[in-house]
């Protein structure tokens, strides 16, 4: 087996060369974690000024690793999609979801050489590296199931979201008319009332805005209690889709009687 | 095909002329969104005084569109319900849920010409336009499933609500006797205690009212923990109904007797 | 049919004389609601002193109705349990759950004639009338399903509760050692920390007590995230039991092929 | 039956000598509860100084009971695992999960004789006694089901946790850039923003940190609404696994091939 083939095996997400992959995955996971920690810690002014060179080193090291990986993946993509012509295989990788994630996570380093960018936007772009964690092999299958469930229930979830939206608008308009006189500052406009409605329906309840009139409290209680129902609805939808998904995965594996070898259809 | 028939096809919610409908739906969705935004922004005093003419224009434009739609729907309703006499078909549309929604969303404009109304009530009536979003074809089927689930579980949901109600009353009465001495202002009466009980059971917890005595805290902890159960109960009920509903939809496709192989229509 | 039999039919919870029952149920529901409202409103000092005679009237009226019902139920219980001797039938009713609820809801009126009681205890006893709402026929079946689900899952729910209890104790002990130095007043002892732990795990979050140290915030975040799991666990258990219960109810109705009349075992 | 055998029967968690066990379980449960109460009450400075001798007595009494139990369990472990050699049986018990729990719960008393330890660490170690409650026979089966569900769903739960983690990091980075200027103290760094993100996504909402800018409120609303979905996801996963688990437990009873009627052991 040529060197290129060996390398391609390492980077083939679907096959997965058990031993080598495990180490590579572990290494990438740690690197992503370090990157996330760096982004968080850089926001502490005192830490940033003191350990600036450490952050620069982490950034350079990560860029070298991720850039190398990106180039290798382009190089070996003709072996991973052997049915396509080399050019098409490369384009397929570059424009795949994972290819874009790979590019986005190295871009914040190279972009400043081309255009002038706000430091904050660069930092935000670096967050794309976080998405790489989803590429890890062991997460891949579970993610596929979750994605499939979300795709299948997207219509019901959308309708639930619309119902929530309608409820929020109606509740906040009513609340604005109820509380505006008693608390002209807190419930200054429907926008403020909408902020209260979201905090109540989702049961977050920061406590920065709440009704003080009797009618407002009754209204608030109704919204909070309906909030329970609006947690129950998507939960029921997702549970139901999840159960179907798991059952379909099982059914797709045919089942035979161990005595007479005939297929059993349950 | 006559012009009337073509138009009727556009407005037939059950058939749905794919191409034309899609554009009409998109247009109506955007119009509803603009209306909702207008209602919210009008409540900002400074924005309202500055851009009053924009709001007037949006209102006039919407009224023209929605009124035209309402008249067309009345006009073509005899083609949509061909089995009924024209008069009956028209009455059927006018008194259908969707007909009432259509009327309610244009009424706030015409009513002031007939009777004197508070501006606030007119604005509230305009919120009915929001319900039009549920009429959009793509939401129709999912909404039907959700409605069917709610209808089928209404008895269990009612009993859950009664149990919650009993728990709230008992908890707030007890809490009133426990906390009244320590916080005579916060827990002034059972009404106030009820406000606390709802905020605790639904886990909103604004923080404007909470127990300070030891016994009150124990009571509060019990209610909060029971609150988890009272989220779990309706969720379980709705999940279960949802699973049955999806399974029934599948079963209704076709089903054969395992003995004589004839189709069974349940 | 004798008068006694006609009356017995009215009060037989299992048969349920449709027409008469419906009116009786409606009447009792309204009476219970008035009683609950009276208990709440009595706690408003100003309302109580002003409308004392109204509350006295409601109390007297309710006592007459509920006492009459209690006596009638004892009287006709031999017809409701025809297989038992009259004495046994009466004792069976008196010591049944519903018989005790019936007695408890009239006791607060008669007790002060026998022993001296705190007014607060009498009021609390009057809350028992609330439980009568569960006796209403239409709620009976759904309540039975919910009770059956709770009974079947009681072991799992108990173990979940024990796990929550262990987590709460461990979290509050750790939090006490972490936050005690920074906030000696808020986290004065493990009892206070336990109050924080419950408010966090149930996601109530009143905001009267929360960590301010970095380690405390990390701990708090972990508990809050685990809280999601501890909502998911009982919900999953109850959903699962609910689905089984509904399926068993369906299975217990035998199913036959409409063509060949043989039983179909799915 | 020899004395050792009788004792072994008492301590065999899998067989369970009904009568004796019940009493022993009851006794141990009460003792654990007393221990937990003691740990909590000791943290109240005033109670500790006043009733120090009571706490010392409880500790000594518990240590004697738990130490005796530990020695007996080592002694009889050769009868409980009769297939192993006595030494192996003893080691098996000592290094089993339950053996470690048993040791950990007596260690805090003996350790100070060997090494110098912080009093706080000793108290934390004493919390291990709480885990003994899981060893009680009646909890054992339900715990096994719950553990099995958690083990089976661990991949999906992990991926959900990763998705939550990614969402938290992205939300807090964005929020830091949005709110930092308006509230430089509250949103001083991404760490603080992360604390806000957890409190919002889990819907705890203490109210010590929340957005005040318009954009920040929109962001917060989105996170809070997504929080509902992130409660729904693990709930759906766990519900689904729970339903499968209960069904498998039922199926494992007996199953026959519909073609040749022989039993199938899956």
Image (tube, coloured by chain):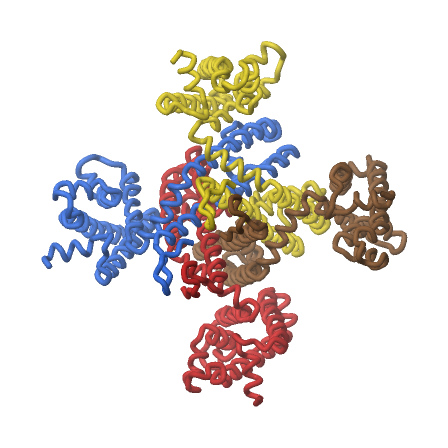
Chain colours: A blue, B yellow, C brown, D red
Above or below: residue D9 compared with residue D131: below
Residue at point 62%, 47% (across, down): B210
Residue B230 as seen in the image, left or right of residue B73: right
Above or below: residue B178 compared with residue B75: below
Residue at point 43%, 12% (across, down): B4
Does the rendering let one see residue C41?
no
Locate residue B3, reporting x and y percent: 40, 11
Name the image quarter holding the C terminus of chain D. bottom left
Q: Quadrant of residue C117?
A: bottom right
Does the rendering let one see residue B54?
yes
Residue furthest to the top: B113
Which of the pair A34/C28 is nearer the observer? C28
Locate residue C151, reporting x and y percent: 61, 57
Locate residue D123, reporting x and y percent: 52, 70
Residue furthest to the bottom: D2
Q: Total marks drawn?
A: 0
Q: Quadrant of residue D18?
A: bottom right
Residue furthest to the right: C113
Residue A144 as seen in the image, left or right of residue C62: left
Residue at point 55%, 28% (across, down): A173
Name the image quarter holding the N terminus of chain D. bottom right
Locate residue D47, reporting x and y percent: 64, 67
Which of the pair A124/A221 is nearer the observer? A221
Above or below: residue C200 compared with residue D60: above
Residue B194 as seen in the image, left or right of residue D101: right
């Amino acid at each position: 087996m040529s060197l290129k083939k060996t390398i391609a095996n390492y980077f083939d997400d679907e096959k997965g060369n058990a031993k080598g992959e495990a180490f590579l995955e572990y290494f990438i996971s740690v690197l992503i974690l370090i990157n996330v920690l760096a982004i968080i810690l850089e926001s502490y002014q005192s830490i940033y000024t003191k350990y600036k060179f450490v952050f620069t080193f982490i950034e350079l090291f990560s860029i070298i690793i991720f850039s190398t990986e990106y180039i290798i993946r382009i190089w070996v993509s003709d072996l991973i999609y052997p049915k396509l012509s080399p050019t098409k295989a490369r384009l397929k990788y570059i424009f795949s979801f994972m290819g874009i994630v790979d590019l986005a996570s190295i871009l914040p380093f190279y972009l400043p050489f081309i255009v002038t960018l706000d430091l904050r936007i660069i930092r935000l772009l670096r967050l794309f590296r976080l998405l790489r964690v989803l590429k890890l092999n062991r997460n891949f299958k579970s993610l596929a199931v979750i994605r499939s469930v979300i795709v299948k229930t997207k219509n019901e979830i959308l309708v639930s979201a619309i119902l929530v939206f309608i409820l929020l608008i109606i509740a906040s308009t009513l609340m604005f008319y109820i509380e505006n006189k008693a608390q002209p500052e807190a419930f200054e406009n429907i926008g403020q009332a909408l902020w209260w409605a979201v905090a109540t329906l989702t049961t977050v309840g920061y406590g920065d805005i709440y009704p003080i009139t009797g009618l407002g409290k009754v209204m608030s209680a109704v919204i909070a209690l309906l909030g329970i129902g609006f947690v129950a609805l998507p939960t029921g939808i997702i549970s139901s889709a999840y159960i179907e998904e798991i059952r379909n995965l099982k059914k797709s594996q045919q089942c035979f009687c161990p005595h007479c070898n005939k297929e059993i259809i349950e």
